[in-house]
Amino acid sequence: MAAKILAQLIVMGSGILARAVVQAYRQALTNASKSGVAQETIQNTIKRASKSMTEPEARQILGVSEQSSWEEVIQKYDKLFERNSQSGSFYLQSKVQRAKECLEATYRGKDPGAGG
């Protein structure tokens, strides 16, 4: 009999506690949206995700100058990408890829026929 009452108290208590946690979470979300904390968090996430490579960094990675043609950029890219593919350095290979993508956007802006 005592075990049954104890079990009922535990079930009721956990139900009340669960409702309180859900209500507190909802209130926290409401407060965050009113104070702008949620918006700030979203903006920080977007900023972190959009950190892209700069053009000078991309040129340095590929070893090309501002006067280099798109064909030179592609040749350097192919050479470095293949070399890192063989040595197994995925990190360097991805840096080379990002550098090419960055410069591709730059060359597209200068010459609509380039970068494709």
Image: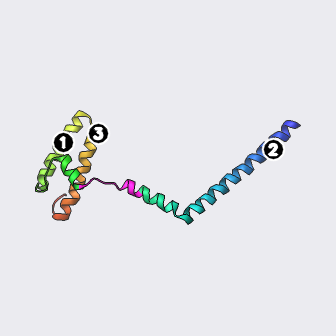
Q: Which residue is mark 2?
A: 9
Residue drawn at x 31%, y 54% is: 52
Residue drawn at x 70%, y 53% is: 20
Residues in magenta?
46-54
Q: Position of residue 31 (x, y in %)?
A: 59, 62
Dot label at residue 80: 1
Distance from disc 2 to disc 3, alpha carbons, whole Å, reads 57 Å
Q: Name which of mark 3 and mark 1 comes first in the sequence.
A: 1
At label 2, which amino acid type do we have? Answer: Leu
Q: How many marks?
A: 3
Q: Which residue is mark 3?
A: 90
Q: Position of residue 68 (x, y in %)?
A: 11, 54
- For the view shown, which residue lies furthest in the front direction? 35
When the figure is inspected, residue 5 is found, relative to residue 16, above or below; the finding is: above
**Mark 2 surroundings: few (<14), some (14-19) or many (≥20) residues within 10 A:** few
**Mark 3 surroundings: few (<14), some (14-19) or many (≥20) residues within 10 A:** few
